[in-house]
Image (cartoon, grey):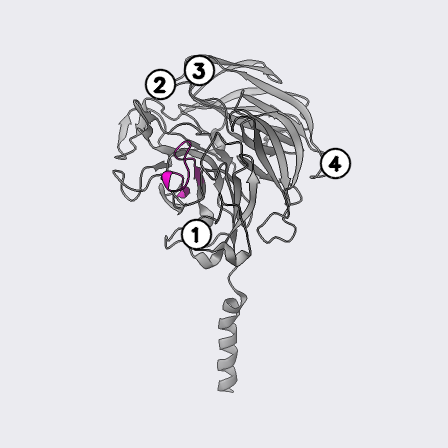
């Protein structure tokens, strides 16, 4: 999670929102986006720093939130369940808390069978919880992995992804990132793991471990990728390939300006495990303002998020966070891409945050465009993403932009695919029948 310094009117849906979230973001004017084929609604407001989401077995939404003592970085983590029974794109109420008391600054939540896995970035921990009898039931603590970071690291651990363990029914692999301890140099100091795992790990990496069905044992720790400054968003494609973003290097002496572009990367399913893939940080990178490759070594990214339409002075998108594969029901070919949420300027929102886009990227071409443009009024940081069959949920961790507020300014938006109107589908058939009638 890069949280560091650095046209559809809702009146159509009958929403009345607080002053800090008066309207949902406006869709892109890109010709690939047909506004009649998407419904954009404000799903929930008044949340404390919603950062990550999962869909539960009954279709409800599980949201990782952080209740502040002094902002996001001094908080207590809660998992909240939201329900939209009539599927109108708006949660029925404020929902219910299904687990509380986690270390704060929750940055990722993922399901692994009957387990829920949660990352707390504040102190550095991964917690495993067991589901209750129903999705509405309270969860139960199974165990925790604690990270013993050395003094003053640039990054900690933020992202999670899970998959069923190949060839081991009931077990799941849990993937997590460990960011670089530096802005512009490879990590050298080890990080200790205690609790459910006992080991040492190194930054600039993605690791995985395996947990059995009830969470009673965890093991098989393995380094999967290296040469990554901070892979704060990880997701598996339908065919099992591992996709992840990487946050670019800040310009030394001017940390609000990127030196290198954020990236979207991939490891094919067959290559997960065995030799550790190296993605080049900090020896090789894509220069942010030019798009030039600097240095040697490492695997090239699928997409480099340089400014649009040209690298020098185009529209910016910085601070990539969670990623999500596009919903299958999205139209116009958009179902074949990857959505990326950008935090942008660390503590700013609205027009002051000119980098907080929601991007759609095409891994096959290396091209991307902004599905939501940056700098929109009432939008802070679209950090959390969740894709379902017909919808993309985007969580704005703080719609005012402030990461130090004690006010519940978090918002979740839902972008739902709208089926082609039935009259349009039937028109060719009706016209054909009329022609035949005239001929007779």
Query: Which of the marked residues, 4 or 3, is nearer the chain's N terminus?
Result: 4
Query: Which of the marked residues, 3 or 1, is nearer the chain's N terminus?
Result: 3
Residue beneath disc 4 = 133
Q: Nearer the viewer, residue 24 or 419?
A: 24
Q: From mark 4 to mark 1, how far is it between C-alphas?
A: 40 Å
Q: Is residue 79 left or right of residue 256?
A: right
In the rendered structure, does residue 284 fall within the stretch colored magenta?
A: no
Question: Disc 3 vs disc 2: Cβ atoms closer than 8 Å?
Answer: no
Q: From mark 4 to mark 3, how far is it between C-alphas?
A: 42 Å
Query: Which of the marked residues, 4 or 2, is nearer the chain's N terminus?
Result: 4
Q: Is residue 238 visible?
A: no
Q: From mark 3 to mark 2, how far is it between C-alphas?
A: 14 Å
State whether residue 134 is above or below residue 69.
below
State whether residue 440 is above or below residue 84.
below
Estimate how packed mark 3 is, as few (under 14), some (14 to 19) or many (20 or more) residues with alpha carbons within 10 Å: few
Q: Nearer the viewer, residue 6 or 251?
A: 6
| Residue depth check, mark 2 versus mark 1: number of the one nearer the observer | 2
Please report the bounds of the magenta region as a residue range: 340-362
Residue beneath the point at 63% across and 29% down? 168
Query: Which of the marked residues, 3 or 2, is nearer the chain's N terminus?
Result: 3
Residue beneath the point at 51% across and 47% down? 327
Residue 232, image x, y percentages: 46, 30
Residue beneath the point at 52% across and 73% down? 429
Q: Secondary structure at mark 3?
A: loop
Residue beneath disc 1 = 333
Q: Secondary structure at mark 1?
A: loop
Residue beneath the point at 40% across and 45% down? 376
Residue 88, image x, y percentages: 59, 54
| Residue depth check, mark 4 versus mark 3: number of the one nearer the observer | 3
Q: Is residue 116 left or right of residue 428?
A: right
| Residue depth check, mark 3 versus mark 1: number of the one nearer the observer | 3
């Amino acid at each position: 999670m890069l949280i560091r310094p650095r046209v559809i009117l809702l009146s159509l849906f009958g929403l009345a929102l607080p002053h800090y979230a008066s309207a949902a973001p406006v869709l892109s004017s890109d010709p690939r986006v047909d506004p009649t084929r998407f419904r954009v609604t404000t799903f929930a407001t008044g949340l404390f720093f919603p950062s990550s989401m999962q869909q539960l077995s009954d279709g409800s939404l599980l949201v990782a939130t952080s209740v502040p003592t002094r902002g996001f970085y001094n908080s207590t983590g809660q998992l909240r369940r939201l329900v939209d029974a009539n599927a109108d794109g708006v949660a029925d109420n404020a929902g219910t808390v299904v687990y509380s008391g986690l270390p704060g600054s929750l940055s990722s939540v993922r399901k692994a069978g009957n387990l829920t896995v949660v990352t707390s970035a504040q102190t550095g921990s991964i917690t495993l919880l067991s589901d209750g009898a129903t999705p509405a039931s309270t969860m139960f603590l199974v165990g925790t992995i604690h990270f013993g970071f050395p003094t003053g690291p640039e990054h900690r651990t933020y992202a999670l992804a899970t998959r069923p363990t190949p060839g081991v029914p009931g077990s799941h692999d849990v993937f997590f990132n460990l960011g670089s301890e530096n802005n512009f140099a490879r990590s050298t100091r080890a990080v200790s793991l205690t609790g459910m795992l006992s080991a040492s790990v190194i930054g600039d990496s993605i690791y995985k471990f395996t947990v059995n069905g009830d969470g009673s044992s965890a093991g098989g720790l393995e380094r999967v990728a290296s040469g990554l400054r901070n892979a704060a968003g990880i997701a598996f494609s339908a065919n099992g390939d591992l996709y992840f973003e990487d946050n670019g290097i800040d310009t030394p002496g001017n940390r609000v300006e990127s030196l290198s572009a954020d990236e979207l990367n991939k490891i094919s399913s067959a290559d997960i495990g065995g030799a550790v893939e190296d993605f080049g940080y900090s020896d090789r990178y894509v220069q942010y303002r030019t798009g030039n490759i600097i240095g040697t070594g490492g695997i090239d990214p699928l997409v480099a998020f340089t400014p649009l339409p040209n690298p020098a002075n185009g529209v910016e998108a910085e601070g990539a966070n969670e990623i999500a594969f596009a919903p299958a029901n999205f139209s116009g070919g958009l179902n074949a891409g990857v959505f990326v949420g950008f935090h942008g300027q660390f503590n700013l929102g609205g027009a002051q945050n000119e980098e907080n886009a929601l991007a759609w990227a095409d891994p096959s071409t290396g091209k991307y465009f902004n599905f939501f443009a940056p700098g929109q009024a009432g939008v802070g940081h679209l950090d959390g993403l969740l894709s379902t069959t017909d919808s993309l949920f985007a969580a704005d961790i703080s719609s005012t932009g402030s990461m130090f507020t004690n006010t519940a300014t978090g918002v979740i938006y839902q972008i739902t695919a709208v089926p082609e109107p039935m009259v349009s589908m039937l028109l060719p058939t009706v016209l054909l029948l009329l022609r035949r009638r005239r001929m007779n």
